[in-house]
Image: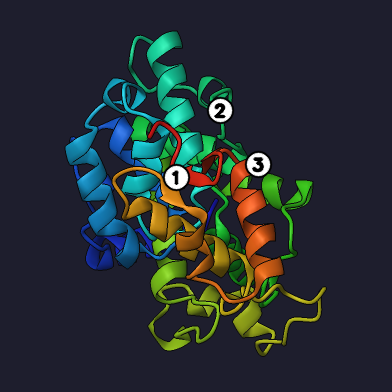
Amino acid sequence: MNALLEPILAWYAENARDLPWRRPGTSPWSVMVSEFMLQQTPVVRVLPVHEAWLTTWPTPASLAAATTGDAVRAWGRLGYPRRALRLHASAIAITERHAGEVPDTYEDIRALPGVGDYTAAAIASFAFGRSHAVLDTNVRRVLGRAVSGVEFPAPSVSRAESELAGALVPEEAPEVWAVAVMELGALVCTAAGPACGRCPVSALCAWQQAGRPAYSGPARKVQAWAGTDRQCRGRLLAVLRESAGSVPRARLDAVWADPAQRERALASLLDDSLVVQEGQRYMLPGG
């Protein structure tokens, strides 16, 4: 018996955010687009881009007919633009292999380009009600604290953690359980300031009962941005997104002062097929 089930579901029924990819009748494609966009990106930044994306490309086939450059341009400033290329590649595969419909099993979703274990489980669960342990950062943190008594989970998912999460998935409405735990982690059991006084399972939480011991595992990664190659890549891509066609090298040189870092970032964009070079001019793929 999962003692966490009823209180977390009751809390979710009262506190769930109204997000378009969770609404009744939303398409599996909407769910899939949201899962790609939400990887390492906050909901507030995803909402307007998700809406615009679904307006422009309401089906996998419509995205498949666009160029990769169109996808990168529409991705805007969400970050990690390779996700746009992967989503475009998945749309092509769905159109070619599945008659334009997002497949409804974990195995078929997992076989799509750019789809990992978490994304396949999330789409299968949220779009089709399949029974899967959906282990994103928020879920791992909630279960780590409530069940295992640790402030933060290990850097990577272990077999034991997967088995524990799988054992907690209910037979009825497993997708509601998955999204409810995720929401609890996003709104209450946060990384920086868990609001234990508002938590529906505080009295059952192993971490709380143990006195909230501090994390003692390997050093946790802190995402940097200012001055990094990622920021440089973003500046270069912004120039190309805002240009109708190709731009000369001088336009790119003007947006980042460090020539060695700029060269390295541009080379990585070319390697990732996010940028195309023709002589000394650069553009997004597909023009």
* Whether residue 167 is situated above or below residue 142 in the rendered picture: above
Q: Are marks 2 and 1 in contact (CB under 8 Å)?
A: no
Would you say residue 98 is visible in this rendering? Answer: yes
Task: Using the image, determine if residue 232 lies above or below residue 280.
Answer: below
- Residue visible at 21% across and 47% down in the picture: 52
Amino acid type of the residue tagged 1 in the rendering: Phe
Query: Along the line of sight, which residue is nearer the eye, 46 or 210?
Result: 46
Name the side, left or right, on which 2 lies relative to 94. right
Q: In the rendered view, tell whether residue 56 sits above or below residue 168.
A: above
Residue 212: x percent and y percent? 65, 87
As shown in the figure, which amino acid type bears the numbered disc 2?
Pro
SS label for mark 3: helix
- In percent of width and height, residue 83 lies at 50, 44
**Up-down: is 241 above or below 44?**
above
Q: Residues within 10 Å of mark 1 (few under 14, many from 20)?
A: many
Q: Which mark is residue 271?
A: 3
Image coordinates of residue 189 in percent, x first then y, are 49, 75
Q: Which mark is residue 36?
A: 1
Q: Badges 3 and 1: C-beta atoms under 8 Å apart?
A: no
* Mark 1: secondary structure: helix
Q: Which residue is mark 2?
A: 113
